[in-house]
Image (cartoon, rainbow, N blue to C red):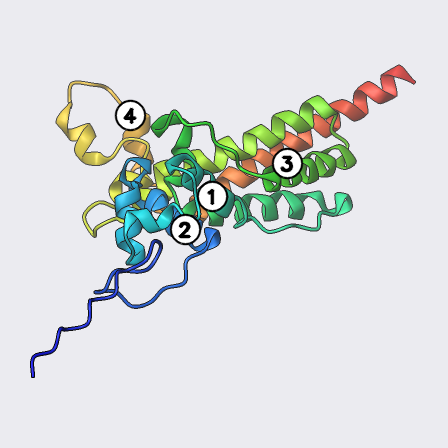
Amino acid sequence: METTPAPTAKRGRGRPRKDSEFISLSKELLGQKALEIAGTEGYSALTMHRLASELGVTPRALYNYVADRGEVINLAMQQFMSLSPTLDFDAEHWKDGVRDAYLATRAAYRSYPRASLLSMDEKVHAVPGPRRTELVERLLKFYVETGLTLKQATSMTRALERDVLGFVLHVDYFYDRRTSDSDYVLNHPVPKPWLDDYPEIPAPYAREALELPEQNSDELFDEVIELRVLAIERLLERNSETSVAED
């Protein structure tokens, strides 16, 4: 007796592909995977098709959780902001606080070095969520309690982001991907091969600097923190001198 085969069940909207393991989607998972893509490869690599492929689902499945790619980018930004821990600052030990803030920010940026390039790579309006406001407010409060004016505290808060982002992109990014024959690029103001390419250019100080001890990226970052601490010390001294003069 001939029988009619049962029809194949259609995969409903939002289900994973047949060739993938079952995965339970959520906005948090989409944001995390989007951050992994954008943070290591740049936002141009973050497409709905790429994200769906990484998660083992169809692009259509993603739209059960997000309206469009712009929302995915915002989820990635919010995930990125959540990497920075809430630090307990102590104004009496402000040097430790500055160091902790710099190290925590560096750790977040270093994990996903290209996540902060949103304004350069994208034209979408990013909404980083409340976390950024909380972190900035806490840092401003710490600097003011240390003895800086609000204007100075604002400058130092901006400086932290510039210092760390610049270091991660110009030093950590290459240090973490370096080869044995490329260390010279990081350790000298002008690497020896570059000096040798233009022997007609007098550069006695740059050549003398080649003799200085080589440093790893952590030691180089310590210099960044030290310079910023020295700047804050000078501001505090100047504020104290101004206060005495006014009295």
* Residue 75, label in figure: 1
Residue under pointer 3: 133
In the image, which is nearer the foreground, mark 3 or mark 1? 1
Residue 168: percent from the left, percent from the top? 40, 40
Visible in this render: residue 5?
yes
* Circle 2 crowding by C-alpha within 10 Å: few under 14, some 14–19, many from 20: many
> Type of residue at label 4?
Pro
* Circle 4 crowding by C-alpha within 10 Å: few under 14, some 14–19, many from 20: few
In the image, which is nearer the foreground, mark 4 or mark 3? 3
Q: Nearer the viewer, residue 199 or 62?
A: 62
Mark nearer the N terminus (4 vs 3) = 3
Q: Is residue 238 above or below residue 142?
A: above
Mark nearer the N terminus (1 vs 4) = 1
The residue depicted at 60 percent of the width and 49 percent of the height is: 100
Give yes or no for contact between labels 1 and 4 (Cβ–Cβ under 8 Å).
no
Q: Is residue 161 above or below residue 107?
A: above
Disc 3 and disc 1: Cα gap in Å?
16 Å
Q: Which quadrant does the N terminus fall into?
A: bottom left
The residue most toward the right is 247
Residue 156: percent from the left, percent from the top? 62, 30
Would residue 205 appear left or right of 164 to someone viewing this image? left
* Residue 30, label in figure: 2
Residue under pointer 4: 204
Instruction: Identify the image quadrant of residue 230.
Output: top right
Give yes or no for contact between labels 1 and 2 (Cβ–Cβ under 8 Å).
yes
The residue depicted at 88 percent of the width and 15 percent of the height is: 246
Give yes or no for contact between labels 4 and 3 (Cβ–Cβ under 8 Å).
no
Would residue 144 appear left or right of 63 to someone viewing this image? right
The residue depicted at 52 percent of the width and 34 percent of the height is: 127
